[in-house]
């Protein structure tokens, strides 16, 4: 049960990162999505979603590896 919860915790930010990539790609091709009034705002929101989702997943993996002592000595506490 705990592994399923951990998977869900990782899937949600991963989906947000994928949405961010989609929004940035749509801005590149000039496709404006519904909630955004301009293309630059759509790109900015996509960038925030992508960086936030990727940062959360990377932090989760780094925290797990730090607990299991699988990081380099300079990253240990």
Image (cartoon, helix red, strand yellow):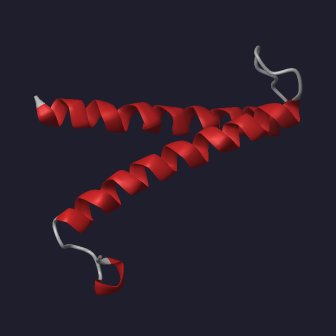
x and y percentages locating residue 6 in the rendered image: 24, 37
- Whether residue 75 sits left or right of residue 38 in the image: it is left
Quarter of the figure with the C terminus: bottom left
* Residue nearer the viewer, 64 or 50: 64
Q: Is residue 25 visible?
A: no
Quarter of the figure with the N terminus: top left
Residue 23 versus residue 51 in the image, above or below: above
The residue at the point 66 percent across, 42 percent down is 48
x and y percentages locating residue 47 in the rendered image: 68, 44
* Residue nearer the viewer, 56 or 46: 56
Q: Is residue 59 visible?
A: yes
Task: Classify residue 26 by image quadrant.
Answer: top right
Residue 62 versus residue 25 in the image, above or below: below
The residue at the point 20 percent across, 64 percent down is 67
Q: Determine the residue located farthest toward the top in the rendered image.
A: 34
- Whether residue 9 sits left or right of residue 19 in the image: it is left
Q: Determine the residue located farthest toward the left in the rendered image.
A: 1
Task: Classify residue 58 by image quadrant.
Answer: bottom left
Q: Determine the residue located farthest toward the front in the rendered image.
A: 77
The residue at the point 28 percent across, 85 percent down is 73
């Amino acid at each position: 049960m705990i592994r399923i919860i951990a998977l869900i915790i990782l899937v949600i930010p991963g989906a947000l990162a994928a949405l961010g990539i989609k929004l940035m790609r749509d801005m590149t091709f000039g496709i404006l999505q519904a909630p955004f009034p301009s293309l630059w705002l759509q790109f900015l929101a996509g960038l925030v979603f992508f960086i936030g989702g990727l940062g959360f997943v990377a932090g989760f993996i780094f925290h797990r590896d730090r607990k299991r002592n699988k990081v380099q000595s300079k990253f240990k506490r």
